[in-house]
Image (cartoon, rainbow, N blue to C red):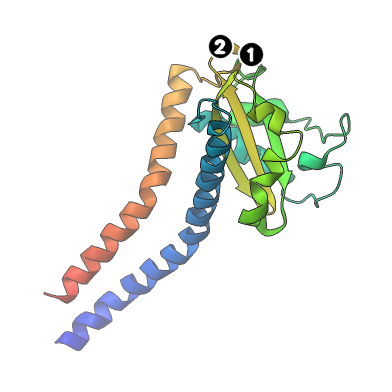
Amino acid sequence: MASSRFSLLFPFFVFFIILCLISHPVICDGDQEDALLQGINNYRTSFNLTTLTKNDNAECLAEEIADQFKNQPCTNTTGSNTVPGTEPQFPNYPSLLAKCHLNVSNTRDGAVMPACVPHLDPSLVLTNFTRTPYSDNLNDTKFTGAGIGSDGNWIVVVLTTSTPEGSYVTSKTDGSDYNAANLTAKNTGLIYHLLFLLIGSLFLL
């Protein structure tokens, strides 16, 4: 009887393990980005500046930009070591904004800071922002929020302001759609855990 029950539940157990393995890199990326935001806020606090609040819309744009950079190698013309005037330009930048339901008018006062760090080494990621020309932005009191995204060796910080021109605020309709999608993604891990508990309870029947 027990053997029969196990045979029925085994495919579900394997499916759950696969889902966990697939979701694991996403969780790690989130940890890396949260750690960077915490490090930046500690840096700002040391200069008696206010901490930056997480901005989901800026995070969306950071993820899109990181995806654009992911296949570019780390050189002195990319990221925080970029020579002024040689930064890579994206002809599809308006499309990247549109994907996050943003436009130029509410992002022009923000700052986009990409950095290339091999394997996103935690010991080097923070210093690529605090010990480079990017520190000028981190020390600027006009910035009040941040969104962080990463892909491959690239991590991108997008800074926002409290003014309309740098708020990264979406329209009510677009914002609701994006926030709903973002909430669904964040709840995926919880669903996996609940599924595991459900399968475990069936074994005890």
Task: Say what secondary structure mark 1 lies in.
Answer: helix
Q: Which one is in front in this view, the residue at disc 1 or the one at disc 2?
A: 2
| Residue assigned mark 1 | 105
- Compared with residue 178, is residue 115 higher up or lower down, i.e. above or below? below
Q: Position of residue 42 (x, y in %)?
A: 53, 38
| Residue assigned mark 2 | 164
| Residue at 43 percent of width and 29 percent of height | 177
Task: Say what secondary structure mark 2 lies in.
Answer: helix
Q: Position of residue 121 (x, y in %)?
A: 65, 57
Q: Amino acid at mark 1?
A: Ser
> Which tag, 1 or 2, sits closer to the chain's start?
1
| Residue at 42 percent of width and 45 percent of height | 185
Residue 88 lies in quadrant: top right
Give 86 or 36, whichever is nearer the viewer: 36
| Residue at 83 percent of width and 38 percent of height | 82
Q: Amino acid at mark 2?
A: Pro
- Compared with residue 17, is residue 93 higher up or lower down, i.e. above or below? above
Residue 118 lies in quadrant: bottom right
Query: In this image, 91 relative to 49: left or right?
Result: right
Query: Could you tell me how far apart the alpha carbons at marks 1 and 2 are, in whole angstroms?
Result: 8 Å
Q: Position of residue 92 (x, y in %)?
A: 74, 31
- Compared with residue 136, is residue 193 higher up or lower down, i.e. above or below? below
| Residue at 67 percent of width and 39 percent of height | 130
Q: Quadrant of the C terminus?
A: bottom left
Pointer 1 local density, CA inside 10 Å: few below 14, some 14–19, many at least 20? few
Does the CB distance between marks 1 and 2 fall below 8 Å? yes
Give 33 or 64, whichever is nearer the viewer: 33
Query: In this image, 179 relative to 62: left or right?
Result: left
Q: Position of residue 204 (x, y in %)?
A: 14, 75
